Image (tube, rainbow, N blue to C red):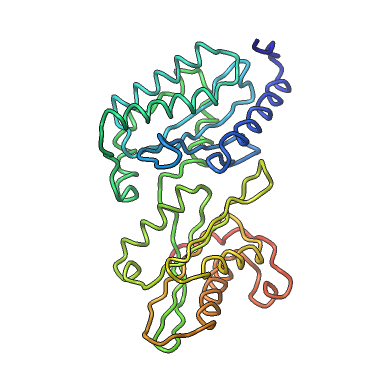
Amino acid sequence: MADIINPDNEGDLQAQIEEVEALSSIYGDEWCVIDEASRIFCIKVSDDLDEPKLTACLQIILPPDYPSVSPPIYQINAAWLRGPERAKLANSLEDLYVEHMGESILYLWVEKIREFLVEKSQSSGTVDQPENVNMTAEEEVDDDDEDIPDFRTFKLNTENAHLFMDHANDEEVPPIKHGNSITDRRSTFQPHLAPVVTPRQVKMVLESLYENKKIASATHNIYAYRIYCEDKHSFLQDCEDDGETAAGGRLLHLLQILDVRNVMVVVSRWYGGILLGPDRFKHINNCARNILVEEGYTVSTDEATKSGAKTKRPKSKKSK
């Protein structure tokens, strides 16, 4: 039986907390907190957990009177999701809300989206998702503005909708900074840095970097990232060696020591024909540490190596 809904906001908040905890437990790394205070979250939904062909990102904001009165504000980000299909999916979510009005419905929404992806994947036979999503995603979203569900059809607060769009729209590629290179015995190392708050942005940063022919031609592109999940008070983090054995793990360990968050560092290495031995790890980490310091993620190289640096927000400045 459904619980009796208390129209008081305190009851709604408790219901939201319990729902978020349950979703976090069910979906693990696919669930991400964007802004706990503003109740902004996102979840990656795919047609198949093991071998995904189609994916979509459901971004939501929970109004103070959800679930008793208002539904979640939401946006579905998927470069392949166009007019009629977007409208069809939006209608199915609205129907679910009407059917379960006053109840917690995020789980039902997520599974409805997953069901939609499975049906599309099976009916199409082939994946029509563009390979270079970051090159077209922003344009396609702009083209489909008319098909994005109108928040007002759910009588939602437009101020909250504006807040949601400001904080949770991860369709644009994050700004990427390029640091100074280090050369040793004809091998060259160069760091790149970008702020990230979702796994999708990690992928977009990588795709954007690989559009650069010089970076794409590097012998190795080692990377690591850390995203702070406020609800769990823990980090979503990962790394990649790209053929430079153990380099990714060492890079991630550096990010952990510096206690940085919501940032991704990529170090490109162009091999010069002479083996560097352990020195290659020193150069990779020095490159990464230098750009983190330059962009304001940690206080200074000396302090960071001695005691670990407190997290700082990146400086707001224009790219050179």
How far across and down, in percent of the image, does residue 140 sit? 30, 40
Image position, residue 182 (x, y; %): 46, 81
Q: Residue at x 30, y 41 (%)?
A: 129
Where's residue 141, x and y in %?
34, 38
Please tell me which residue is depicted at 36% across the width and 58% down the height of the picture: 208
In the foreground, 145 or 88: 88
Looking at this view, name the residue that lies furthest to the bottom. 185
The x and y percentages for residue 95 are: 45, 14
Task: Name which quarter of the figure residue 301 lies in.
Answer: bottom right
Which residue is at 40% across, 52% downward?
Answer: 204
For the residue pair 297 and 244, the one nearer the viewer reads as 244
Q: Is residue 297 above or below residue 103?
A: below
Quarter-of-image position of residue 90: top left
Q: How many marks?
A: 0
Question: Extreme front residue here?
Answer: 50
Which quadrant of the figure contains the N terminus?
top right
Quarter the C terminus occupies: bottom left
Which is nearer the eye, 166 or 187?
A: 187
- Give the side of residue 144 with respect to residue 110, left or right: left
